[in-house]
């Protein structure tokens, strides 16, 4: 079998595989990098996404020959959770459910933020449109990408401990620290009597109670 040299996660790796072996199987079976998942094998689900020179690619349909043309990064090649804003945001937003699709999602989200540090919802949807999550984590993924973007855009060294990402100073929105002025004090309007509530209308004693406490109908 021919020998190929790949650059994977910053290291040169020599592999002896058939020329038509997809990169996915080289990563998983030959190199033991099983963080990259197999979903469809047809470039339809995104589970196998890795980076080739920073661009997200589907490793299930990338030949080993193509893969030798650039630097491959897999989910194992990204920094650990404590140091990677996207992984950190994924944990903070509690994104994964079964987790199977998530390495691919994270690789595409990372590639998006590398190009566009302030993505809007439509940019996120577009970047992840080729990914399928059977657990339906799409909303949390959006939140996590926005969170990662805020943390990436926070001025380094100016955030105080406890401040949410993207915000300077101590945590929480900026507070008005002056005590509120008493009604009727100088410059303040005089105190007003509390508004009168309209009388409560009660149903006649014979009205039946609804079955659903929320008042809605059942939907199967
Ligand atoms: S396994 Fe590659 S896109 Fe589904
Ligand atoms: S978290 Fe289960 S498939 Fe996406």
Image (cartoon, rainbow, N blue to C red):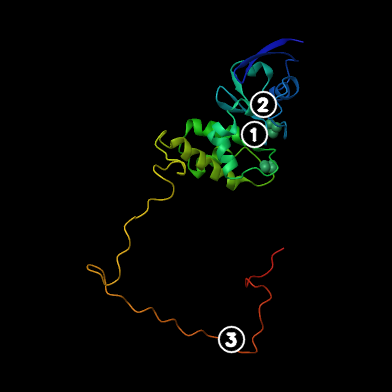
Instruction: Find residue 122 and report its horizontal and vertical position in percent.
Output: 51, 43
Q: Which residue is mark 1?
A: 103
Disc marking residue 59: 2
Question: What is the residue that sits farthest to the left in this orientation?
Answer: 186
The answer to whether any part of residue 43 appears in the image is no
The answer to which of marks 1 and 3 sits earlier in the sequence is 1
SS type, badge 1: helix
- Alpha carbon separation for disc pair 1 and 2: 13 Å
Mark 3 surroundings: few (<14), some (14-19) or many (≥20) residues within 10 A: few
State left or right for residue 173 relative to residue 83: left
Mark 1 surroundings: few (<14), some (14-19) or many (≥20) residues within 10 A: many
Instruction: Find residue 207 and report its horizontal and vertical position in percent.
Output: 64, 86
Mark 2 surroundings: few (<14), some (14-19) or many (≥20) residues within 10 A: many
For image coordinates 55% across by 25% down, the residue present is 54
Residue 34 versus residue 212 in the image, above or below = above
Asked whether the residues under the numbered discs 1 and 3 touch, taking CB atoms below 8 Å apart as contact, a structural biologist would say: no
Residue 7 versus residue 214 in the image, above or below = above
Residue 103 versus residue 71 in the image, above or below = below
**Quadrant including the C terminus:** bottom right
Q: Which one is in front, 125 or 187?
A: 187
The answer to which of marks 2 and 3 sits earlier in the sequence is 2
């Amino acid at each position: 079998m021919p020998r190929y040299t790949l650059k994977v996660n910053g290291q040169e790796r020599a592999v002896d595989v058939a020329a038509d072996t997809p990169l996915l199987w080289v990563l998983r079976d030959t190199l033991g990098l099983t963080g990259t998942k197999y979903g469809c094998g047809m470039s339809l689900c995104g589970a196998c996404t890795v980076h080739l020179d920073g661009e997200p690619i589907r490793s299930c349909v990338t030949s080993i020959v193509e893969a030798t043309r650039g630097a491959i990064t897999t989910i194992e090649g990204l920094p650990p959770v404590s140091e990677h804003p996207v992984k950190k945001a994924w944990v903070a937003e509690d994104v994964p459910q079964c987790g199977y699709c998530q390495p691919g999602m994270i690789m595409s989200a990372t590639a998006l933020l590398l190009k566009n540090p302030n993505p809007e919802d439509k940019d996120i949807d577009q970047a992840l449109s080729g990914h399928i999550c059977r657990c339906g984590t799409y909303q949390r993924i959006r939140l996590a990408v926005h969170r990662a973007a805020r943390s990436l855009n926070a001025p380094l060294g100016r955030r105080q401990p406890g401040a949410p990402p993207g915000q300077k100073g101590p945590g929480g929105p900026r507070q008005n620290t002056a005590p509120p002025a008493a009604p009727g004090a100088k410059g303040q309007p005089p105190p007003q009597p509390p508004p009168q509530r309209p009388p409560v209308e009660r149903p006649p004693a014979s009205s039946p109670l609804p079955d659903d406490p929320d008042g809605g109908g059942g939907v199967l």
